[in-house]
Structures are given as C-alpha cells and as structure tokens.
Amino acid sequence: MRGSLSVACILFFWSAMVSPLFARLPAFPRQEDIRGMAHSAPFVFRGKVAQVDLTNNEQEYKEGIAHITVDRWYRGVRHFPRVEIHFAYQADGFRNGHDCSDLVLGSYWIVFARPGSGAIFELIHDCEGALRVSSLLAPQVSGDVLSKMEADFRAGLSDSDPGVRLVSIQRLAALGMPASREALRIIAQGNQGNEVESKWATLAELKAGDISALQEAIPLMVNLHHEQARQDLEPDGTLVTVTTAYAQPEGEIALAVEKLRDLQAVPALISILDQAPDDLARNCAAAALAEIGDQRAKDTLAAHLSDPSQYVRYNSLLGLAKITHAEACAVANPENAEQAESRCKQWVASKN
C-alpha cells in the first residue's frame, strides 16, 4: 500500500503529458539517469569534440563519428587521449526518446559508452548516452566516479555562458549529492539574479536532500498552474484528450517534494497542501505527509478528505490511517477508497 503513494503522484504527472503511444518514453531533458549510467557504462569520460565525420547529413537527421579529445576519464581505459564515438541526431529526438545528442564541433560532453566496432565506441543510450557539459573542470578530484563527476559539474557553475551554466545546475540535480548543496543554495536564493537558474537550483537542492530549499519551493508550488485537460473533436469524428506539459522544473520540483521524508519538511508540506491550487502539487505534498506520518499533519489531512482530487483524498486517507491508527480510516484496496473516505470523515467529525 505504501508504494502506491509515489505511483499515484508520478502517474498523475505523466497523465498530463502528450506522447505518442508507440514512442519510447524519454527522460525530461536534463533529468537523465546519470547515476544509473555511471554505474552501468564500462567507459565514462568527458571532453571536447575535435572532429566530426558525417555519414548522413540531412536537414532533420545526421549520423557519423565524433572524435573527442578526452580531458577526464571517470571509468575505462584512461590512457586514450582521443576517442571516436558513433552518434546519431534527429531534430525531434527528445520527443521520441532516440538520437538526442548533437555532437557538434567544439562542444563539450560527458559520454557513457560501450565497445563498438573496432576502435569506435557506441553510446550506451542513444538519447542520454552523451550529455552537454561545461568546459570547466575542478582543479582536483577524488573519490568515486560520482564524486568526481559532481566536482566537475560544480565547477561548471562558474561558466560565463548562461546556457552551459544552467546545464551544470541540471546535471547536479540529476546527481543529487550533498556536496553540491552550498553552491546550489547561493544560486537558489537569487544571488546571481537569474530566475531560471534559481528554480533549477531549488530542484537540485531538494534532490540533494537540502530541506532549506523548501522556502524557495513553496511559492513555486503555490503558483504552479497547469491547463486542465480538454476534449477536442477531430475532423474524422475522433474524440481526443488534449492537455499541455507541466512547466519545468516546477513539475519536477513537485515530484521531488513527494520524496521528502524529513520531519523538518512537515510545516512546508502542510503549506503546499493547503495553499497550492494545482492537483499535482497538492497530491505530492499529501503523499509525502502520508509517508512521514507526523501528528502535526493530522488536521490538514483530515480537511483534504474532501479535496476535489481523488489522489489527494486517497493520500490524505492513508496519512490519517498511519497517524491515528483508526480502523475507520484503514483501506486495504484502493478500489474501496471512496467508502473508506466517507467512514474516516465521519470518524474525524465524531472526534471534534
């Protein structure tokens, strides 16, 4: 039953996304599974594209071999100063989850690779296997693969290019390591005067476990608005459901909020649940409160047994069951949630 909390929050999030049924579900740009790839790729390195030999160079699609001058090996044969990597790129790659890396001359990348044909490497993932990075490196790195990556990504926060600086913040968000907190906190609190960077740094802080970032997250969640789904009639008479994606990183911040389990987060989670007009923000806050099971959330969860969102009502019900141990609020099957909500509301009323 406990696992259903996270599932409900994530399913609600993805229900707002438009994606062809036949497409591989892609990660959001800049939210790739860097940790997973770092552990599974036999070769991990970063460097600059020094030469590109294209075998296909169409307007919407290109393919070829990129020659990368390596400036840091994280895993693999470390004495290779230059590596050849096969890549393909299509303009709508992020939409269908394939061929997303445009290895243009002079650009810098971190590459997660496997052996290919002869001396040519292949990306372990054709959409996420090569990720843009800053040219800046940490002067010294130590520790495991992830620690070295984190230090180099953090060095990129000083890049003069705002686009590359933003990428560095997003890479740190994907890693979610405590070592990043202090540098991210400076950006999240607006010391550099860049609202977009501040939002992404807030996400990165939360994913690094920094509860203080909730002070920046609360107004973002309270102001989160998403266009409600509507049904349109196609010319052929087909009825289709149309909606828009959540703004980013606000949508991802909501999912990061759902994963909070620190007791210090409870007051902020209560504020989000009580104030946010958007169903996703309330649902993720309710899910986190239900998992934490802190007495301070009892009244708020009880009030949200009448929430317009069925997901929020269900998470509120589970939270109350955990906090009060009341049989009236217990639900063994989500299909029986409506009856349990009614019983629980009656029980709450009898206690007031």
Image: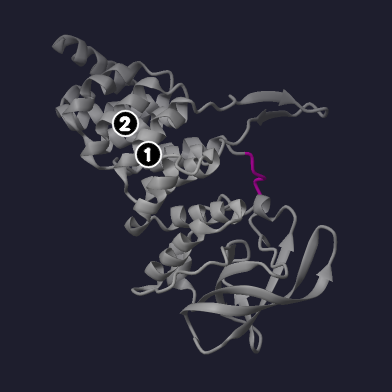
Q: Give the range drawn in magenta.
A: 18-22
- Where does the image place residue 333, in percent across and percent down from the top left? 32, 33
Residue 21 magenta: yes
Mark 2 Cα within 10 Å, few/some/many (few <14, many 20+)?
Answer: many
Point 41% across, 50% down: residue: 184
86 w.r.t. 240: above or below: below
Residue at x 30% of width, y 20% of height: 341
Q: Residue at x 49, y 53 (%)?
A: 169
Q: Looking at this rendering, what residue extends furthest in the right direction?
A: 58
Q: What element carries label 2?
A: helix
Q: Mark 2 points at which residue?
A: 269
State which quarter of the image contains the N terminus.
top left
Residue 257: which disc?
Answer: 1
Residue 121 pos. (x, y %):
62, 80
Q: Is residue 52 left or right of residue 209?
A: right
Q: Nearer the viewer, residue 208 or 113?
A: 208
Q: Could you say which quadrant of the image residue 38 lies in?
A: bottom left
Mark linked to residue 345: none
Image vertical order of residue 296 relative to residue 195, above or below = above
Which residue type carries mark 1? Val
